[in-house]
Amino acid sequence: EPEVTQTPSHQVTQMGQEVILRCVPISNHLYFYWYRQILGQKVEFLVSFYNNEISEKSEIFDDQFSVERPDGSNFTLKIRSTKLEDSAMYFCASGAGTSNQPQHFGDGTRLSIL
Amino acid sequence: LAKTTQPISMDSYEGQEVNITCSHNNIATNDYITWYQQFPSQGPRFIIQGYKTKVTNEVASLFIPADRKSSTLSLPRVSLSDTAVYYCLVADPPYSSASKIIFGSGTRLSIRP
């Protein structure tokens, strides 16, 4: 079964640095998402992306964050000037967009800000 | 979105049937009920979705009574690998790959040998 892959599995970064989290969605999917999960808390929606633009974003997704689909296969989340509170698991998801078809999630990148 | 209430945690033993009930008293006419599963250190995974009565797939069954104010996810003959967090979600349109998902706190299921 095709799957969403995320790299790296674990990223350790100094506070204030920029990080780029990478995702390869399932190849024929059209809808792309980023979620995050702070340790011990709920999975939270960050942003959805369709037709090469952001379709919706949460209040968490402020100017510090950006997404890009640079080459038709990768989907990236960039966090500028990281803060301690950005430490979390970041999940990428993708979907075909057809009715009753679920989103497929990757296994996440654990981001640790020191 | 209809508010859902589910147990914070449950324990069971290998080989048992596990039933996790979710209350959604304010479910709207067009809302669907969807369950996701999240293993430790993995992303959520879709299990099952239904509107009424009973839905069954290779993983689980979903029972929805006529008033739809609750639903029960049934896992037959659980194993240690079923230890996970299970999320009950209610929304219209049904959660599909074209819409964001709003997760609650879920039920942490622990299976013991």
Image (cartoon, rainbow, N blue to C red):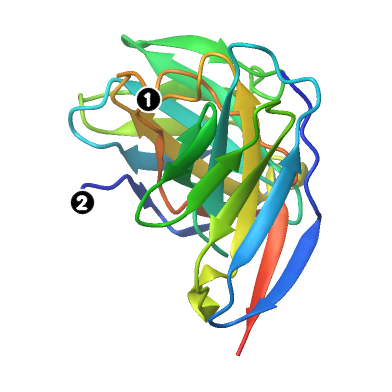
Q: Secondary structure at mark 1?
A: loop
Are circles 2 and 1 on residues that touch, CB within 8 Å? no
> x, y (%) of residue B28?
69, 13
Residue found 64% across the figure and 57% down from its top: B85
> x, y (%) of residue B27?
72, 20
Residue found 44% across the figure and 59% down from its top: A9
> x, y (%) of residue B8?
81, 55
- Residue A112 as seen in the image, left or right of residue A55: right
- Residue A30 as seen in the image, left or right of residue B41: left
- Residue A54 as seen in the image, left or right of residue A18: left
First along the sequence among labels 2 and 1: 2
In the depicted structure, whether residue A56 falls above or below residue B6: above
In the depicted structure, whether residue B92 falls above or below residue B6: above
Q: Secondary structure at mark 2?
A: loop
Of the numbered discs in the image, which one, if any, rests on residue A100?
A: 1
Residue found 43% across the figure and 24% down from its top: B96
Quarter occupied by residue A17: top right
In the depicted structure, whether residue B65 falls above or below residue A99: below
Q: Which chain does the residue under circle 1 lie in?
A: A
Q: Which chain does the residue under circle 2 lie in?
A: A
The answer to which of B11 and A27 lies nearer the viewer is: B11
Amino acid type at image mark 1: Asn
The answer to which of A60 and B74 lies nearer the viewer is: B74
Residue B70 can be seen in this image: yes
State the quadrant of the C terminus of chain A. bottom right
Residue under pointer 2: A1
CA distance separating discs 2 and 1: 18 Å
Amino acid type at image mark 2: Glu
Of the numbered discs in the image, which one, if any, rests on residue A78?
A: none
